[in-house]
Amino acid sequence: MVRKQQVGQLAVVTMICITTMTATDTKREFKYNVGPKAAISINNEYGPVSVKPSTSNQVVIDATLHSDKVEVDNTQNGNRIELRSHLLTGATPENGQVEYEVLVPADASVTVRSTTGTLRAEQLHGDLAMEGDSAQVEIRDISRSHVHVKTLNGPITLTNIQYGHVEVTSVGGNITLNGVSGPYVEVTSTTGKIRYDGDFGIGGEYKMTSHTGDIDATIPAEASVDVTARSVRGDVQNDFPLAPKSHSSFIPVPGRSLVGTAGKAASSVLLRTFSGKIRLKKR
């Protein structure tokens, strides 16, 4: 009998907790009509932001507020829209969270900032900027746009970025690029690892730099590249067939640096680290 009472009490407590948690959530929806190449800015102190393309000239934003310690300020000035999570007295990283689900015209320029929470964007071709501290950043299926990403320790993953001008920076987060190509791709990390899996495109300039993190680049046998790889104190390993260059700006040191070309050497590739390892691999 006692055990049944305890189970019943536990069930009541559980139901109360779920009801309370649901009651504290507030959903708000914002809709804006915009013209071509609108500019959308979202500044979220805590919580995730997801951006996807809409099927119209409307910007639709669904915001879920997890307490009454935060509110959403929103403004529209012509073709520019700005939303900001406004923390109130007593706000914490837990109760100050807002979850944003955002639909924008595919040609819109989007800027997103968040301290924590996952930042996602996909299937856009306007300029895209994402910035966070520990926030994880995931961007996929972007074409013909400028992509700028910056984090302190949050990991960054870019997938299927075509014909892009890409600049990625992280202090301690790992950076992964899958199928990323364009006229200019620059990746910088202080302590995080950099991983590239792709073909380095045609006619692009690729720079990947880390201070203490490793750099791994995996490319297909038919890649057309002009490669320079250097590590001051780390190892440089290569199992990709490169033809030696007749002229170089420095004398390669076996195990520490390499220079060489493959195919028509259409893209320039620079891999550089101070004490990390560099690995160039054939897929």
Image (spheres, rainbow, N blue to C red):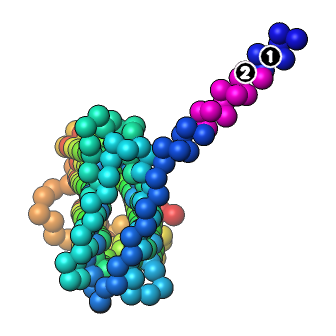
Question: Badge 2: how crowded within 10 Å, few (<14), some, or many (20+)?
Answer: few
How much space separates mark 2 and mark 1, taking CA atoms? 6 Å
In the rendered image, the residue lying farthest to the left is: 249
Foreground residue among 246 and 135: 135
* Residue 9 disc label: 2
At a point 51% along the width and 64% down the height, the residue shown is 283
User: Which image quadrant is residue 244 in?
Assistant: bottom left
Dominant secondary structure, magenta: helix
Q: Quadrant of the N terminus?
A: top right
Q: Are circles 2 and 1 on residues that touch, CB within 8 Å?
A: yes
* Amino acid under disc 1: Gln
> What residue type is disc 2 on?
Gln
Secondary structure at numbered mark 1: helix
The span shown in magenta is 8-18
Does 271 appear above or below 10? below
Residue 224 position in % (x across, y down): 36, 77
Q: Is residue 24 above or below residue 55?
A: above
Magenta span includes 11: yes
Q: Position of residue 274 (x, y in %)?
A: 20, 43
* Residue 95 in view: yes
x, y (%) of residue 238?
A: 39, 55
Residue 229: mark in rendering: none
Is residue 254 shown to the viewer in this render?
A: no
Indicate the quadrant where residue 165 lies.
bottom left
Toward the bottom, the furthest residue is 36
* Point 48% across, 43% down: residue: 24
What residue is at 44 percent from the left and 46 percent from the top?
66
